[in-house]
Amino acid sequence: MFDGESADEALERIDAWERSLGRRAEQAQELARRTAELTATARSRDGLVEVTVGAEGRVERIHLDERTRQQPAEDTARDLMETVHAANASLLKQFQEITAETVGTDTETGRMLMAALQKRLGERDE
C-alpha cells in the first residue's frame, strides 16, 4: 500500500490493474487474429506484373502477363521488384491501420510490432 492508502483503495487499484491487463490481452489477441490472414496485392504501372504478399511479407503469388516475353528481362525484373515493394507498402499500411484500431500505434506494443514487420520486409519507416 502507498502512504495514506486504505486496504480498499489498494484492492481497487489492483483490480483496475488486472482489468487493464485483460483489456490489453484482448486487444493483442484481436490484432493477431485480424493480421494473421492479411494479404496485399500490387500491380506494376503497365499491368504486366502482379504480386501478392502474405501477412509475414512472403511472396505468395506472382503473375506475369504473357507480354513480358516481349520486353527485356531487365525491365521485367525491375517491375517485379518495384511491385513487391508496392505490395509490402500496402501490407504495412493495412497492418498499421489494424494496429491503430486495436493496441494503438502510439503504444510500446504497437511501435514494436510495426518496427518488426518493417524489418522483416526490409522497408524503412515512411
Image (spheres, grey):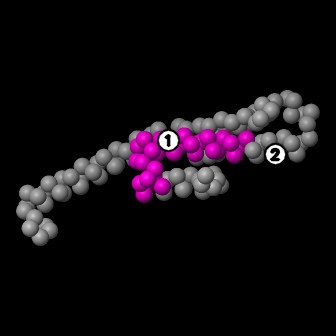
Q: Going 63% across and 55% down the picture, which residue do you hit?
A: 124
Can residue 32 be seen from the camera position used here?
no
Residue 9 is inside the magenta segment: no
Residue 117 locus on image (x, y percent): 56, 52
Say if residue 16 shows up in the picture: yes
Q: Quadrant of the N terminus?
A: bottom left
Q: Is residue 30 left or right of residue 47?
A: left
Q: Is residue 81 left or right of residue 25?
A: right
- Residue at 8% in and 57% down: 8
Q: Position of residue 61 (x, y in %)?
A: 69, 36
* Numbered badge on residue 97: 1
Residue 104 on the magenta segment: yes
Left-right relation of 86 to 35: right
Which secondary structure, mark 1? helix
Magenta stretch: give its range.
83-111
Residue type, mark 2 in image: Arg
Residue positioned most to the front:
126
